[in-house]
Image (tube, grey):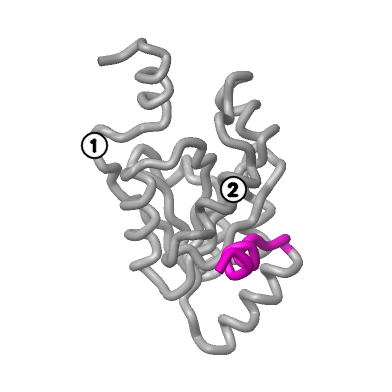
Amino acid sequence: MLDATKAKVQSLDSLQRLVAAWRVHDHKIVFTNGCFDLLHLGHISYLAEAKALGDKLILGLNSDDSVKRLKGNTRPINDVNSRAMMLASFSFVDAVVIFEEDTPILLIEGVLPDILVKGGDYDLNQIVGHDVVIEQGGIVKTLPFLEGYSSSNIVSRIQGEAD
């Protein structure tokens, strides 16, 4: 079982071969990305909804250095290998690919998903890669957040800074 989970964590090159095989079978490819530092019910709900939009869900995962640049020196809490394996263990996640950059634009250009998904706090023009996906005939969707769940709030509660 662990081998099957590990097999979901892909390099961009191997992911492109996998996507080509999926496309032969007319699978709709959904792509989303994020840090996914402390997994919570909001993440699970979001990822399950994203998967429901298509046949295969690819998750772009920020590397540790990328998370640190985006969230500050105290993050990530969990290292990239732990985060990748936790995400790959979900049945609704078909592939996880780690990226070093601050944005997943190279992944989006390399995969050209049919559907690009982000959380509801983004406007279409703020979603990295929206233009690439729309230009190749795909769609971009935002999904609402499950209220009351956030990694930052969890960190604050652990540190005793929130109720």
Name the secondary structure under disc 2.
strand
- The answer to whether any part of residue 76 appears in the image is yes
Is residue 162 covered in magenta?
A: no
The residue that appears at 29% across and 42% down in the rendered structure is: 145
Q: Residue placed farthest to the right in the image? A: 13
User: Which of the pair 100/120 is nearer the observer?
Assistant: 100
Residue 88 drawn at (x, y percent): 53, 59
Residue 109 drawn at (x, y percent): 65, 60
Looking at marks 2 and 1 on the same chain, the residue that comes earlier in the sequence is marked by 2
The residue that appears at 23% across and 37% down in the rendered structure is: 147
Instruction: Provide the residue designation for mark 2.
Output: 61
Q: Residue placed farthest to the bottom in the image? A: 25
The residue that appears at 30% across and 14% down in the rendered structure is: 162
Image: magenta residue range: 1-12
Answer with left or right where residue 148 lies relative to residue 35.
left
Name the secondary structure under disc 1.
loop
Is residue 11 covered in magenta?
A: yes
Image quadrant where one finds the C terminus? top left
Residue 114 drawn at (x, y percent): 49, 69
Looking at the rendered structure, the kind of residue marked 2 is Leu
